[in-house]
Amino acid sequence: MVVKFTDISLLYPNPAIREEMPGDLMIRLFKHYIPHAVLLLGLLDLLLLFVAGELGWHLRVSQISIDQGYITDRMAQLTGFALVVWIAMISVGVYGSEALRSMRFACARLLVAVSIGIITLAALELILPELAFWRSMLFYTMAIAMVLLGLDRLLIGSLLGTSAFRRRVMVLGAGLRADRLRKLSQRPGSGFAIVSYIGMTDAKRVVEEAISRDALHDLGDFVEILGVSEVVLAIEERRNALPLKDLLRIKTMGVHVNDFSSFMERETGRVDLDTVNPSWLIFSDGFSSSRMLSSAAKRVFDIIASIMLLLATLPLIALFALLVKLDSRGPAFFRQRRVGLYGQPFDVIKLRSMRIDAEKDGAKWAEKDDPRITRLGRFIRKVRIDELPQAWSVLKGEMSFVGPRPEVPKFVDDLEDKLPYYAERHMMKPGITGWAQINYPYGASIEDSRHKLEYDLYYAKNYTPFLDLLILLQTLRVVLWPEGAR
């Protein structure tokens, strides 16, 4: 006899599970997924930064006894202060998963972000004095901003708990895919919590706690009772197993329904090569054909930014070129053949960080504590100074600031044979920085290259100027907190 469950308390006797606040879905901003809670937190932070600027103004003018004036008279300064510090917060990862889960981590990143913002504003005063605060006032606004932003996070944490940033997900399936989702949900910083697994077939279960579909009278009612905000289809074999009636009912209830590959893409920021197939890549949203305008804008940005970067860092490049010559025998610059757009080869130029005989036996990946790297080379790799001369390749149009990492032809030939869809990464210009570079440490194996390819495919599929901006901002985080540079 099959027992039909309709009371949630019979299935989940733990009240903590039943009473957990339902999480929000994500909003897709310029093809990039941002959780509603994170977006609201960011907008609240922007407002608090504006308030901090105003409070700092009142505190300072009261000390020197001058007329406070009207807030409309300093609207440009307040807005500039809030935006500069807010952009710095995005750059250093204040809205990353770790900062959303750990107050200590959040405060450390906030301190760095506010400090960078204040330094930028102090420098801005020298260029545009009519738009900037007095430097003596920035100390007060920095202190007030830290207090307000810290209290903001403490308040949200105490009132809403970590569930404020976690969506409630039901998984249809109990096999290997469901188990992968379970492991993903248990990782620190996960943006979702799985409230139930439903075994849709009689196949052997990997997730033992899954509830049989036959034990539920109405799956739609069960979704409503649990406060589910999203249902993920994680069935191993879809043939004759798709619960179309249930999915239609859930969809019309306003609950988001997602397939496994799309869900993994959104939650991990990469295309999952283990489950993706050509038809999914062809028919899923992405790889937009309307890129002519954005590509032209990207090229204009590359030209302007590369000229400015080369002019600004020319003394630094010259200094380290001299130091490289003094540190080890050989030329200051290193030239190597790489594969670029549409598989066309080009020469990349970097400051030399290895011994001149490093590739006497052919090109090979750098290893941890690689003995081929010079003493100075280890430092310039860690802070990415060796990458600066690549701005010349950007100016010539062989590279972009943002894009997949250009690889050596020998590696490309090998990887195209071993990794599916590897050739697709060459449909975009290679970049100095990229989605894979900021999300995955340096790759030194086929498996590492596979993971980085997943990020590269995500970038190619979801490219927008907004995503480029996010990558450029997050590159500052990678430079400040080196993650796997070799």
Image (cartoon, rainbow, N blue to C red):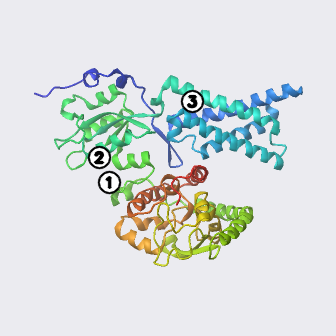
Residue found 38% across the figure and 64% down from its top: 446
Q: Taking 8 as reference, is 140 above or below it?
A: below
Residue at image point 65% right, 42% down: 113
Mark 1 vs 2: CB contact within 8 A: yes
Residue 280 location, quadrant: bottom left
Amino acid at the residue labelled 2: Arg
- Say if 54 sits above or below 441 in the image: above
Q: How crowded is mark 2: few (under 14 residues within 10 Å), some or many (20 or more)?
A: many
Q: Position of residue 287 (x, y in %)?
A: 46, 59
Where does residue 479 sit, x and y in percent of width and height? 60, 53
Spatial CA distance of label 1 from label 3 is 37 Å
Q: Give the left or right position of residue 181, taking residue 58 as reference.
A: left
Q: Crowding near pointer 3: few (<14 within 10 Å), some, many (20+)?
A: some
Question: Position of 125 compared to 395: left or right?
Answer: right
Question: Amino acid under label 1?
Answer: Thr
Residue 306 visible, this orientation:
yes
Q: Which of marks 1 and 3 is in front?
A: 3
Q: Where's residue 452, x and y in %?
A: 44, 58
Mark 2: which secondary structure? helix
Secondary structure beneath label 3? helix
Sequence-wise first label, 1 or 2: 2
Residue marked by disc 1 = 275
Mark 1 → mark 2, Cα distance in angstroms: 9 Å
Q: Do the residues labelled 3 and 2 touch (CB within 8 Å)?
A: no
Asked if residue 68 can be seen in this view, the reply is no
Residue in front for this viewpoint, 290 or 373? 373
Of circles 3 and 2, the one toward us is 3
Whole-Å distance between the Cαs marked 3 and 2? 34 Å
Q: Is residue 132 left or right of residue 476?
A: right
Task: Look at mark 3 in the image and give the residue it sits on.
Answer: 153
Residue denoted by label 2: 177
> Secondary structure under badge 1?
loop
